[in-house]
Image (cartoon, rainbow, N blue to C red):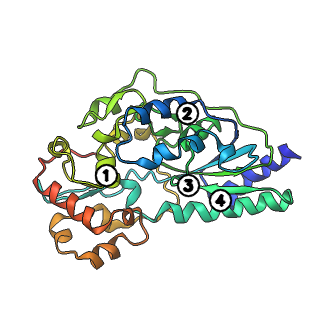
Amino acid sequence: MSATLATDIKSFAIRELGFDLVGITTAEPLPGAEHLSRWVAGRAHGDMAYMASTSAVRADPRLFVAGARSVICVAMSYHEPNEPRESGPVGTRAVVARYARRRDYHKAIRPRLVRLGRLVSDRVPGASWRPAVDTAPLLEKELAQRAGLGWIGKNTCLINRRLGSELLLGELVTDVALPPDEPETDHCGTCRACLDVCPTRAFDGPGCLDARRCISYATIEHRGELPKALLPSLGAHLFGCDICQAVCPWNGRAPRSCNPALATRQQLGCLTREALEGLDDAGWAALAAGTPLRRLDFRRFRRNLAAIAVAPDQAEES
């Protein structure tokens, strides 16, 4: 029964729900808990207090769903090599990370996970399950690696040998026992392109990201003023950063695989500071609506816009 159900779950996830990757792992505690504990103790999480307060749950899916036995991991690709690149004179651009130039992935992934959960309930009456996207307290990349979807690269992104690292993840945690897939192994080898290219030197080593020196963290998560030490390296980054992914060889050889559910908003790939300067609160809300940009409130939008106006231009690879 469990093997047949696992096969049906995977088929439904790919053929009916449109996920690009699906795998299954156990709900056993994760070894990454130790790394997470050291990361938080070293304050490398910056002011993301929720990382510390939810660390116990993140390390053990059984605390996320009582009696959990399996985690179904899924992924959608947003890799679009031919997506328009930013252009324009120095100081005129405003760059948005590629994942944020499209429909909000939470709205694309979560409803599909709910449908997947209903399939589980139909097949196993009384089954408990709970969907999760990245705002949920799970170590989702480690779960995805354990489910065979890819491995965690030196830049802390999940990398799939076929699709690269431009992936958005989701999980369905359930108390139904399902046969787990084989974990993926590391295929970064000696490559350290992502570590060496980071303009803020945010990596203390492979897999060791200090969020306090990360452009993505600074422009999205950080609530206060941007650190002065970061400003010379900010370039045109208004929201997020793709630099470490842009140089990854696995992305260079990945086929165009943008999931149709992640519709691109072309205007978000060619923003200019001049146009953004004219936006009021309502204008920014309208531009951000339905995309991951809505995470950035108007105050921090203006903060970031002011910072890129004075930051030396960087050679973005977005």
The disc labelled 4 sits on which kind of residue?
Leu
Choose between 242 and 130: the one closer to the eye: 130
Image location (x, y in percent) of residue 101: 37, 61
Please state if 104 lies on the left or on the right of 288 as rendered. Answer: right
Separation (CA) of disc 1 from disc 4: 30 Å
The residue indicated by pointer 2 is 33
> For numbered disc 2, what is the local secondary structure?
helix
Q: Residues within 10 Å of mark 1 (few under 14, many from 20)?
A: some
What is the quadrant of residue 60 in the picture?
top right
Front position among marks 3 and 1: 1
To which residue does mark 4 refer? 113
Q: Is residue 153 above or below residue 296?
A: above
Q: Choose mark 1 or mark 4, whichever is in front.
A: 1
| Disc 4 + disc 3, Cβ < 8 Å | yes
Q: CA distance from mark 3 to mark 1?
A: 21 Å
Residue 248 in picture, x, y percent from top left:
38, 36
Classify mark 2: residues with Cα within 10 Å, few (<14), some (14-19) or many (20+): some
Residue 171 seen by the camera: yes
Choose the circle earlier in sequence order: 3 or 2: 2
Image quadrant assignment for residue 276: bottom left
Q: In the picture shown, does residue 143 fall above or below 82?
A: above
The reply to whether residue 149 is visible in this rendering is no
Of mark 3 and mark 1, the one earlier in the sequence is 3
Q: Which residue is mark 1?
A: 222
Give the labeled residue for mark 3.
133
